[in-house]
Amino acid sequence: MTDPLKREEVVAARAIKVTFGAVKALDGADLVIHSGECVGLVGHNGAGKSTIVNVINGGLEPHDGTLTYGGQAVHGISAARTNGVRCVFQELSLCPNLTVNENVRIMHAELKGWNWRARAGELVVAQLQKIFPGHAIDCDSTVDDLSIAERQMVEIAISFAGLNQRPKLVILDEPTSSLDAGLAAQLMAYIRTFIGDGGSVLLISHILGEILSTSDRIVVMKDGRVVADRAAKEFNTHSLVEAMGNVVREQEFSRKTTEQTGSPVLSMPPPRGHGIAFKAYRGEMIGLAGLGGHGQTDALLDLYLEHNSNWWPTRKRDIAFVAGDRSLNGTFPLWSILKNLSIASLSQLSSRKIVDRAREDALGAGWKQRIEIRTPDIANRILSLSGGNQQKVLFARALATTASTVLMDDPMRGVDIGTKQEVYEILRSEAAKGRTFIWYSTEMDEIRLCDRVYVFREGVIVAELVGDEISEKNVLAASFSEGEAA
């Protein structure tokens, strides 16, 4: 690899300070990205990663410090785009009521003339095929008809695409949070190709394996500062977690291995008589695995709607749901953090249809501390939080209820490793008390924590794995092979 000192500085942010009221989002942070390198950026939720991305992307003016593109001090989103900076945000920003091709036009204003739709289609289709060969996405579809994984793939492809010239720097903020292992591997392979051709990537991810395997250099942030900036080969998982300010803990728990007795708390027959029936028993952690978009989320929604009225509120609900797409199905953006957290528990917090504010405040304060929601005031709006902290609120919302069963649709999207470890312990503790968790995850490390795993393919459960059978090899075998392979 070429000496970084001899390569062009694509973006250089030095001594950057950004404050939001009394909160120091960035406190003298430095981040320099050269051509032909992938920089991994890690840190806990609220460490300042998204803020420095918004500074580099031109969307946020720093209160102090210097920002240069190619050595030139210019500011603003237009300046960033002119200098070849593209960004895929953690909260996807496509227009849901427009087609994929029309979204390409918004991102690439140079697409003009009567035939722009066809050229936009050719541009995004070609880029999708480069990054995700065999994707099967219809680019004439409106974005809201696509799954969250497909929307993420489209936004990534649009950002890497270039009509007249390719981008110099692509910022990827949690780019694989909705992608299964196969799609994530395709993206990581393309990143290395893009870097090899002289491009630059800033990769932000809480999946440390991706950071260690793909990055040339890793930058660690904590409390608005850069606390480590070294070559990726100088880190391993243990030292990287320690640099972030966490302690590595054993993630494997002893699974339930005894034969289940009694009636299942939830069950679902196989669709059209094909595949394996779904059953979940009291106190189990059930994992839903397989390639993304093969019916796992649909199964969770079917289970939820079957046991809850879709229009009439009830005093006590037996099932809680943690949505995976927080911006679409999870948060109420105009509400406070506390209101977002307590909305599912109002029946428990009310007397004669009036909410007891003291009990609501106590509920919020307790979960803020237990799950470490990083905010100075839980009365702040939910959008004041980082994406990962918003996800913590959704998780706390479900666990704060009296529901005996919790359905989770990839709930750890964008959550830092320290919080994940805390949540895993909470899950196991709650399961030991008799609570049942049904958990779809795109991360194999999380699937391995489950007592039983159902593998989905083409909308059907094709394998049931128990105990030591739960492994990446067996999940992949069932995901791709014919028959009920395990």
Image (cartoon, rainbow, N blue to C red):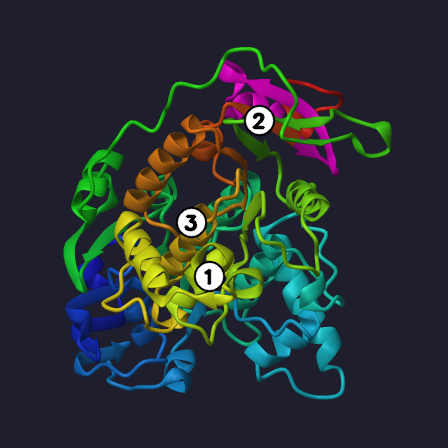
Q: Single out the residue that lies furthest toward the top.
A: 258
Instruction: For label 3, count other residues whose C-alpha is less than 10 Å away and answer few (under 14), some (14-19) or many (20+).
Output: some
Look at the numbered disc 1 and give the secondary structure of its residue: strand
Q: Residue at x 24, y 85 (%)?
A: 73
Image depth: mark 3 or mark 2 in front: 3
Instruction: For label 1, count other residues whose C-alpha is less than 10 Å away and answer few (under 14), some (14-19) or many (20+).
Output: some
> Residue 279 in the image: x percent, y percent?
66, 26
Kindly indicate the quadrant of the structure image that contains residue 70.
bottom left
Q: Amino acid at mark 3?
A: Ala
> Residue 408 in the image: x percent, y percent?
53, 44
Q: Amino acid at mark 1?
A: Ser
Kindly indicate the quadrant of the structure image that contains residue 359.
bottom left
> Taking the image as drawn, is residue 38 in sight?
no
Q: Amino acid at mark 2?
A: Val
> Residue 228 in the image: x percent, y percent?
15, 52
Marks 3 and 2, how far apart in space?
25 Å
Q: Residue at x 58, y 43 (%)?
A: 318
Earlier along the polypeptide chain: callout 3 or callout 1? 1
> Which residues are the magenta region?
456-477
Q: Which residue is mark 2?
A: 453
Q: Nearer the viewer, residue 468 or 17?
A: 468
Residue 459 in magenta?
yes
Q: In the image, 70: left or right of 30? A: right
Q: Which residue is mark 1?
A: 350
Q: Are marks 1 and 2 in contact (CB under 8 Å)?
A: no
Q: Which residue is mark 3?
A: 400
